[in-house]
Amino acid sequence: MAGTLVVAEHLRGELRPVTFELVTAARDLEGPLTVLVAGANAAALAEQANVEGVDEILTCAAGPEEFENDAAQAVLEAAIEEVEPEVALLGFTINSMGFAPAVAVKLGAGFASDVFAVSRDGGSVVAQRSFYGAKVNAEVEFPGAERVVLLLRPTSWPPAEGAGSAQTRDLAAPFVDSRARHNDYQEVAAGDVDITTADFLLSIGRGIGEKDAIPQFEELAEKMGATLSVSRPIVDAGWMANARQVGQSGKTVKPKVYLALGISGAVQHLAGMKTASTIIAVNTDPEAAIFNVAHYGAVADLFEVADELEKLF
Amino acid sequence: MKIVVCVKQVAVLGDEVEFTDDERDVDSDFLDFALNEWDSFATEEALQIRERHGEGEVVVVSVGDEDSEDAIRRCLAMGADRAVRIEGEGVSRDPISLARALAPVVRREEPDLVFCGVQSSDAVQAATGVALAELLGLPRVAVVTKLDWDAGAKTARVDRELEGGLVDLVEVDIPAVLTIQTGINEPRYATLRAIKQAEQQEVAVVEPEDVGEPGYAVRRMFVPPKGEGAEMLDGSPEAIAQRIKELVEERMA
């Protein structure tokens, strides 16, 4: 029982960036580092996965080309049986959510998700994750577990780079009939705006309270020369189009200035904007998580600040 | 037609925090409680299917202590038919333990569909539903933003929301466990009258079976180090706005 198994994630023929972040996290753990690449196009993807620090790549071409959770589960279970890793690392992504917890409960493994730090204390793995709206962090341990499955928060580790010298070998995995089958992909309608190319985003969240407040911020954004973007609750409520949503399920943005009004800073939102050059946040809650990534913050009523901004621009 | 909706009462932490003496959790005096936002969407989705079908039963199941029945009753007030509370004392709050506590109760109901919220706002684990599906031996789809199912049909079509605004169109065999994403519908408000009525409704209470080792155990909780943190802008709204204007002009130059 040793080493780390990293589960590569891919979409439409490309490894996703989180895969390389997982490799970085795995390099800090002891023992050999194996990367699992599963899917009909595994051989081609394996070359992309051969980065510095990887000792071995397991490819498994069984199963469908695109993600289906039954197949992903069967392959991961076969790989764990083959490699017998102490730790299996996956991204805390939509795909992983669909099968990693099933593997953990089936194998009786330790399990934690949205993990942003991993270390060892003595021989044991200790992970860090947040609770209570990211206002509190915790160290969690895995008593009695021979094996630990961890889903790591994307963009928490730098991506591994550099050419690797890993050996590649095939893994035989059982064929399974998928009970949930991929039919097609669909892009969310692009809409009339591309927030990913804007230099200045005025971003509004749940704090605006009601739909009737939207026009005020549309006007303010125009006055300030900003593009209006929103956090998830605004889209969920149907107040603004999907195309303006910042966050994991929306767009990742990197403007020069990100001015967040009434956004508390859910992890999934922060993932989409935390690399903005300058982040300014206004929120009534002094403990709001957005202040942890903001460069400038103000604990204030967003409407009062917005009214003053209106006069200044 | 029967749909089981697994719900959770979540804790909301205010401005101040103190920890329990063993430092493994937040002192509950500093927490407020509410129905998990994702679960209100899951409940609404079940109710809409029942209403479209014209008959059927929506059963709410939750793991929690007696105080957590407020969340369950909120679902009853929305229109759920029946509720079961699995006594939460002694059940660890990690998703593996929760799934093991839920599984026997959900299995006995023999539902056509099982809904869970994608995640709970206080723990963001996004795992209980899929672990539950494994224990039940059922197909599952995580992070569902659209569901198209005619009661009685052997398959359903669902949209699965991927990162970056991409949608995966999936066909899933029924019965299945689906984890429901916010925004899939517009959860109804419970009327005051319905809330009052729900207070009188019986909630069946069952003891959990042995849930074994937890997926994890909390060793220590602490307030996150602030890092460099934000430079706070103080003063009146006018002063704050003035400073924001200066910052914007400086950074955009």
Image (tube, coloured by chain):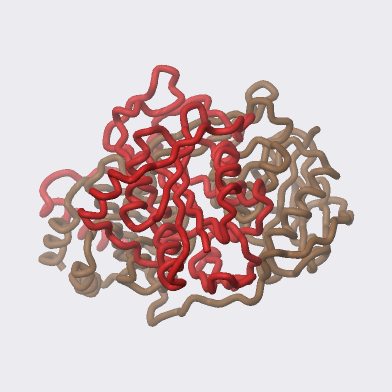
Chain colours: A brown, B red
User: Residue furthest toward the top?
Assistant: B21
Q: Is residue A62 above or below residue A161?
A: below
Return the x and y of residue A201 as percentages of the image width and height. Answer: 33, 66
Of residues B110 and A80, the one nearer the viewer is B110
Of residues A102 and A46, the one nearer the viewer is A102
Q: Is residue A260 above or below residue A145?
A: below
Return the x and y of residue A116 as percentages of the image width and height. Answer: 54, 41
Of residues A36 and B247, the one nearer the viewer is A36
Q: Is residue A297 visible?
A: yes
Total marks in image: 0
User: Residue A305 sits in which quadrant?
Assistant: bottom left
User: Residue A212 sits in which quadrant?
Assistant: bottom left
Of residues A30 and A88, the one nearer the viewer is A88
Q: Is residue A200 visible?
A: no
Return the x and y of residue B131 as percentages of the image width and height. Answer: 62, 47
User: Residue A121 sits in which quadrant?
Assistant: top right
Query: Residue at left 42%, top 56%?
Result: A269
**In the rendered view, does A124 fall on the left or right side of B147?**
right
Query: Residue at left 34%, top 62%?
Result: B187
Quadrant that contains the C terminus of chain B: bottom left
**In the rendered view, does B90 fall on the left or right side of A273?**
right
Query: Residue at left 83%, top 63%?
Result: A62
Q: Is residue A276 above or below residue A30?
A: below
**In the rendered view, does A63 fall on the left or right side of B192?**
right
Return the x and y of residue A252 as percentages of the image width and height. Answer: 47, 63
